[in-house]
Image (cartoon, rainbow, N blue to C red):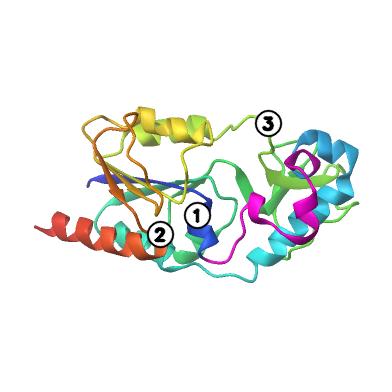
Amino acid sequence: MKRIVVLSGAGISAESGIKTFRDDDGLWRSHRFEDLATPEAWERNMQLVLDFYNERRKQLFEVEPNEGHRALVQLESHFHVDIVTQNVDDLHERAGSKNVLHLHGELKKVRSTKNPDLVYTLDQWELKKGDTCAEGAQLRPHIVWFGEAVPNISKAIPIARKADIMIVVGTSLQVYPAAGLLDYVPSSSPVFLVDPKAMASSYLTNVTYIKKTAVNGLPELVRELINAHSQ
């Protein structure tokens, strides 16, 4: 069975109504990312960081997967599909995708500030000061903050190396180390870049540019791939 690897970014989630970090309005527009999404911010003002992630988490409980997410699920009837996502939401999983690797953490999960192996899934949106792990340490968002290592990149690289087909959707390929995964895709494997602002690049080879949003572009691409596979 051929293997399709999908690298997804904020654009696909934005079409479900999830705002990206830089699009957040209201209170958060007046804060730099250093105020909200770094280890230093956590040490400096834990409550502000908790409030920021609580608001994002609350929104996540209110949105649903879109046609782009659901289209990727259809591929699993014909291909082995791995999704490597830069997103911290669970929309791929809720749509029905089975193999999802989160590079930057998961918004609905929290972990111990002392023992990173103690990870818990929240069944509601709020994490508060005084919420502790089994060992008594404060819980923090299970998110890779700016300046922190991306441990799951070591799991993503061998996945990229096995790609027979690569789909890139909803990402500008400006965020590393995620963007560097394309360096590991076999040169003979076609790459499909779904992005309404897609620009041809000498850096990428064997690429088909689909200048559409995830909701419009992915269902069409999935139908084409399934039809080609069936012939």
Q: Where is residue 107 in the image (x, y as percent from the top left)?
A: 66, 53
Q: Which sits earlier in the primary sequence, circle 2 or circle 1?
A: 1
* Marked residue nearer the N-terminal end (3 or 2): 3
Q: Which residue corresponds to the image point at 73% horizontal and 42% vertical from the top-left?
A: 33
Q: Residues within 10 Å of mark 1 (few under 14, many from 20)?
A: many
Report crowding for label 2: few under 14, some 14 to 19, many 20 or more residues within 10 A (C-alpha): many
Residue type, numbered disc 2: Ala
Q: Percent x, y for residue 226?
A: 21, 59
Q: How many marks?
A: 3
The residue singled out by tag 3 in the image is: 148
Q: Name the residue carrying label 2.
A: 214
Of marks 1 and 3, the one in the foreground:
1
Q: What stretch is highlighted in magenta?
A: 16-35
Q: Do the residues labelled 2 and 1 touch (CB within 8 Å)?
A: yes
Q: How far apart are marks 3 and 2 (CA)?
A: 29 Å
Q: What residue type is labelled 3?
A: Glu
**Mark closer to the observer (3, 2):** 2
Q: Earlier in the sequence, mark 1 or mark 3?
A: 1
Amino acid type at mark 1? Gly
> Left or right of 134: which side holds 85?
left
For disc 3, the neighbor class at 10 Å (few under 14, some 14 to 19, many from 20) is: few
